[in-house]
Amino acid sequence: MTTWFITGAARGLGNVWARAALGRGDRVAATARRPEDLQPLIDAYGDSVLPLALDVTDRRAVFAAVQRAAGHLGGLDVAVNNAGYGLFGMVEEATEEQARAQLETNLFGALWVTQAVLPLMRARGAGHILQVSSIGGVAAFPTLGLYHASKWALEGLSESLAQEVAPLGLKVTIVEPGPYGTDWSGASAVHTEPIAAYEPIREARRAGAAGRAPNDPAATAGAILALVDAPEPPLRLFLGAFPYAVAERVYRERLATWEQWRAVAETA
């Protein structure tokens, strides 16, 4: 039986993964800003769920929640940093408050959970941290600059982390989903105040997304269970087929640009 700590477990991918773990007999500490949103999990799985109210931007609260979860579950095998949201808008449009809040949740929230679980996992010499990034942690698109900033930062932090903890027997995987039918771009999203000059770019983004049906979040459950069960999990895992074409294009373009400008670069 595996013990899990999952942030943002009330809805979306976090909820799918909590249900997948609980459905096979694992135990889950499930966190949400509003604990009443976790009631459906409790109704379905009873004492196998430890519901915890948690704002991941509150470092002290994160450490307290992790300690409570570890005490209740007898340790933590898997920590899933899933809590996050999207800030939609042009870079110029983002207010200081919006920009800081995006990073506080998507980057610092994951950092606080990571720092809280590491002493427990180090003491046992085992543990797996799943950092939920996005294809937006590999490639960038207009209207999501601050979101990308949070995910690119999380990826860099997590790649260093993986190298630091591997000798201690701990695993880190950066999970990079494509588009799924969650409320990430709906009820959970935050939008900037639009500047009219950018409307053609905004309209092009809307047109590009039109008619593209997002994937069913439930389809990710098997992949996540396979990931945490793997004796040698990868550093990175895409979810869905969509990210492959994007990443392959982006890396081809980067390599071509670096090569094109190599002669200039080597003069520096």
Image: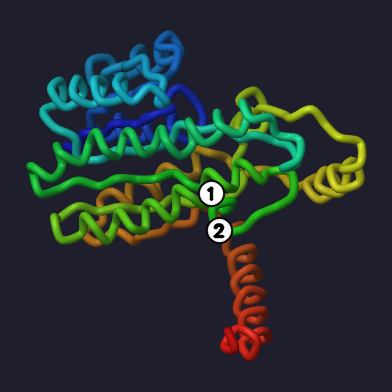
Mark 2, residue position: 138
Where's the C terminus, which quadrant?
A: bottom right
Q: Amino acid at mark 2?
A: Val
Position above or below: 114 against 229? above
Residue drawn at 28 percent across, 48 percent down: 228
- Near mark 1 (Cα within 10 A), the count class, few <14, some 14-19 or many ≥20, is many
Q: Amino acid at mark 1?
A: Ser
Farthest residue to the top: give it.
36
Q: Secondary structure at mark 2?
A: loop
Frontmost residue, 191 versus 260: 260
Q: Position of residue 234 (x, y in %)?
A: 34, 61
Farthest residue to the front: give it.
268
Disc 1, disc 2: CB below 8 Å?
A: yes
Frontmost residue, 128 versus 153: 153
Position above or below: 77 against 238? above
Q: Secondary structure at mark 1?
A: loop
